[in-house]
Image (spheres, rainbow, N blue to C red):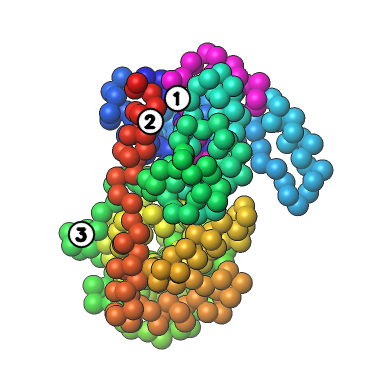
Amino acid sequence: MKVIVSGGGTGGHIFPAISIANAIRHRWNDAEILFVGAEDRMEMERVPAAGYKIIGLPVAGFDRKNLLKNISVTFKLLRSMQKARKIIADFKPDIAVGVGGYASGPILKAASAKGVPTLLQEQNSYAGVTNRLLAQKAAVICVAYEGMEKFFPRDKIVLTGNPCRQDLSVSEENRESGYAHFQLDPNKRTILMLGGSLGARTLNKSIVDAFPKLAALNDVQVIWQSGKYYYKEMKQLQETGKIPSNVHLFDFLHRMDYAYSVADLIISRAGAGSISEFSLLGKPVVLVPSPNVAEDHQTRNAQALVDKEAAVMVSDVLAHVLLFDVALSLVKNDAQRMILSRNIAQLAQHDSANRIVDEIEKIVIV
């Protein structure tokens, strides 16, 4: 069994890709798995750290704002197609799996041209350009949201959900360990604010603006993941005594199981992978969609939950004014949080990685 897994660019693409690869290896111990990503993106570090070989393509995304930059992008795409054809010829995969992101375009196109079956995994409620372009040649398209027939052929769609990190669990034991780990007060309500591994400027600005409100509260505490891009700047605020004592600053959270277990409410961007985790864990959440993503897909992800009373949304442009007013009101409203928790849990898709591997098995094992 030889499988190519391709895509990346963000954690939202990489975590599902690695989860699928792990599930493939669990089902077929001798499976040979090769990742293909973009040369300068985070998958080139994260995939080898997970124990898999990866080859990088010189591919880059199209620049919608500066069209002149796309001259070099076109040359990179041509070089990537040439390299992708060689990878397919040398590796001879039984199937190619694409998880989205522009890196998956050349390799899945080259695979299809050689008669290698392809499977797509689309994380978002608004399908990405790469997956839309590859859909006609795909054998199966695994999706996380209903209503995706507006992007893909209906007869190819299978609702599987998004594979998540396998080490996440909410428990009373993790809750108690989390209070100690983050040096929290068990008697206070806890807000967990996540800006992603790199951070989110809007979320960081929103909490800084809310410091006076937070400092005046003795029954609420915050775990604040600022992200590595902003941590040095935020750490200076802490060193000068500007961060209230009930706000706990971190650049990155290594024990997400603890963080989720202690959280009474989560503030987050609206990436598909994060939403899948919140759904599986039944966590009430305030979503602040990033405006800096293709086709504004995070707003569409968030709206899909808001329509089912499964989340609250605050727009990026209003976050610095409204976010913590909304969050502080909600963290003290047990009844409303219970409704959000119940409704988001009903949207969860369990065991997604294995369900995707079921589809791979149907294609490859004849």
Segment colored magenta: 80-102
Residue pointed to by mark 2: 360
Q: Is residue 101 above or below residue 316?
A: above
Q: Position of residue 176 (x, y in %)?
A: 20, 63
> Disc 3 marks which amino acid?
Ser
- Which residue does the image show at 56% across and 56% down from the upper left? 297
Mark 1 and mark 2 in contact? Answer it, CB < 8 Å. Answer: yes
Residue at mark 2 to residue at mark 3: CA–CA distance: 33 Å
Residue furthest out toward the bottom: 216
Q: Which mark is residue 171?
A: 3
Q: Which mark is residue 259?
A: none
Whether residue 252 is visible to the viewer of this picture, yes or no, is no
Query: Mark 1 or 3 closer to N-term?
Result: 1
Q: Secondary structure at mark 2?
A: helix
Question: Is residue 310 one of those drawn in magenta?
Answer: no
Residue furthest out toward the top: 90
Depth check, mark 2 against mark 3: the one in front is: 2
Q: Is residue 164 above or below residue 26?
A: below
Q: Secondary structure at mark 3?
A: loop
Quarter assignment of residue 61: top right
